[in-house]
Image (tube, rainbow, N blue to C red):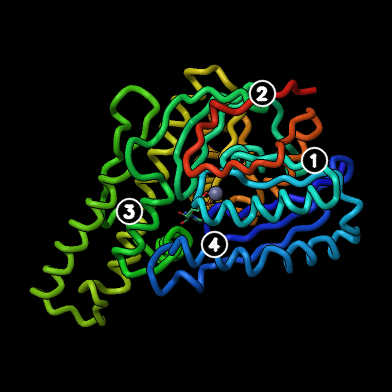
């Protein structure tokens, strides 16, 4: 079965062609970073218009790259939520129309299920059951995964998502948008131990997270350091926040270390609690090298295995949607002509499919 995947839930137009026999045949991505950068975050109306501009050219590009014609497709998968409604509708209407014109089924995909299944694109895919830590810009959750559509929520963020905390802290530090990769890059130049940030909620039982306090802690640390810089008249140039480049790197590192530690501690607790031997990390923040490294060390200690997608499939992409859609189409699931795009959508509401 050959499936076209369409992702347009936020600020990336992602298209891919996935074959159940041969794996990923092609994928194309257009990022809207440059479009939204001057606003410091995603502007929903601009996002929708940009998806409309790029969807068709990227579909043509992916089909050409895969070396197939439209009529070879057996199905179309599209992200139906959660996400920005206008952005979702752009992708969903193109997907549904194409499927109708080609007389093939269309299937909706939950964006977070796409992230969760993305490690299955790799040469060494995880088998069920496994624990999943999903860390993206909009969600942070731990789930017990028994199979496709069998997701038991173990814990989630009570406030900001992990990626959101990276983005907001990066913005405070003057590192721009999107903040996660920029903050991680700055942290590489940081001195460990210069600042120490708290590890939110690790000393409380349970598997929930809270990240908004880290951002406030970063702000307070910055303000104190800026006052100190002023009083001591430092020789290095100061940025708009009154910080030296080294201050920014040191704070970035202290934040990153605290966020990563928190994610590792909770994942370890989940592994022990669920007696599980496999951990999947996925979503944009799973591209973070410190997180991968520390999670790898923790998992090793427990003789468990760690799985994550290739860096390009951690953040939003069409490949994960094509793969998830293919699995659901193979199980006979499909959507009628009415399009339902959902800003919010619980993963537990998804139908399960019997895994072979
Ligand atoms: O999964 P994703 O592309 O979009 C959502 O579904 O939200 O995740 C985007 C998030 C952003 O918050 C971004 O800053 C973060 O993932 N991110 C990172 C890294 N790369 C992306 N955070 C930390 N370190 C990174 N290397
Ligand atoms: Zn995402």
Task: Say which residue appears at 32% left-offset and 32% top-offset.
Answer: 202
Does label 2 or label 3 sit earlier along the sequence?
3
Q: Residue at label 2?
A: 352
Task: Say which residue appears at 25% left-offset and 81% top-offset.
Answer: 236
Disc nearest the viewer among 2 and 3: 2
Q: Secondary structure at mark 2?
A: loop
Does label 4 or label 3 sit earlier along the sequence?
4
Categorize mark 4 by other alpha carbons within 10 Å: few (<14), some (14-19), many (20+): many
In the picture, which quadrant includes the C terminus? top right
For this view, does 238 lie left or right of residue 174?
left
In the rendered image, residue 318, in percent from the top left (x then y), is placed at 68, 53
Give residue 210's quadrant in the image. top left
Q: Which mark is residue 105?
A: 1
Task: Say which residue appears at 13% left-offset and 79% top-offset.
Answer: 233
User: Label 1, label 2: how many angstroms apart (C-alpha)?
Assistant: 18 Å
Q: Is 197 drawn above or below residue 355 in the view shown?
A: below
In the rendered image, residue 28, in percent from the top left (x then y), is placed at 72, 62
Categorize mark 1 by other alpha carbons within 10 Å: few (<14), some (14-19), many (20+): many
Q: Residue at label 3?
A: 254
In the rendered image, residue 9, in percent from the top left (x then y), is placed at 56, 52
Q: Which mark is residue 48?
A: 4
| Residues at discs 1 and 4 in contact (Cβ within 8 Å) | no
In the picture, which quadrant includes the N terminus? top right
Give residue 111's quadrant in the image. top right
């Amino acid at each position: 079965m050959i499936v076209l995947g369409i992702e347009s839930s936020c600020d990336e137009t992602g298209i891919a062609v996935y074959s159940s026999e041969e794996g990923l045949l092609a994928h194309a991505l257009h990022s809207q970073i440059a479009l939204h950068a001057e606003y410091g975050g995603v502007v929903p109306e601009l996002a929708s218009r940009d998806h409309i501009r790029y969807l068709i050219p990227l579909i043509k590009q992916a089909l050409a790259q895969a070396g197939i014609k439209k009529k070879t497709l057996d199905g179309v998968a599209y992200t139906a939520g959660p996400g920005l409604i206008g952005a979702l509708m752009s992708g969903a209407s193109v997907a549904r129309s194409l499927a109708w014109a080609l007389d093939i089924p269309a299937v909706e995909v939950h964006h977070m299920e796409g992230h969760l299944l993305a490690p299955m694109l790799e040469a060494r895919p995880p088998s069920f059951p496994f624990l999943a830590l999903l860390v993206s810009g909009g969600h942070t959750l731990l789930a017990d995964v028994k199979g496709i559509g069998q997701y038991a929520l173990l814990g989630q963020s009570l406030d900001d998502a992990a990626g959101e905390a990276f983005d907001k802290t990066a913005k405070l530090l003057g590192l721009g948008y999107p903040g996660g990769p920029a903050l991680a890059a700055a942290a590489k130049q940081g001195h460990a131990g210069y600042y120490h940030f708290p590890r939110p909620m690790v000393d409380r039982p349970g598997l929930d997270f809270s990240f908004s306090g880290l951002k406030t802690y970063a702000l307070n640390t910055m303000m104190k350091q800026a006052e100190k810089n002023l009083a001591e008249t430092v020789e290095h140039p100061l940025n708009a926040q009154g910080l030296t480049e080294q201050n920014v790197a040191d704070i970035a590192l202290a934040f990153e270390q605290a966020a990563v530690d928190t994610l590792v501690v909770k994942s370890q607790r989940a592994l022990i609690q669920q007696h599980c031997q496999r951990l999947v990390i996925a979503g944009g923040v799973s591209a973070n090298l410190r997180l991968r490294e520390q999670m790898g060390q923790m998992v090793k200690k427990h003789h468990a295995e760690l799985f994550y997608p290739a860096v390009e499939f951690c953040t939003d992409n069409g490949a994960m949607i094509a793969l998830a859609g293919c699995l659901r189409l193979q199980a006979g699931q499909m959507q009628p002509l009415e399009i339902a795009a959902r800003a919010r959508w619980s993963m537990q509401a998804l139908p399960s499919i019997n895994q072979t």
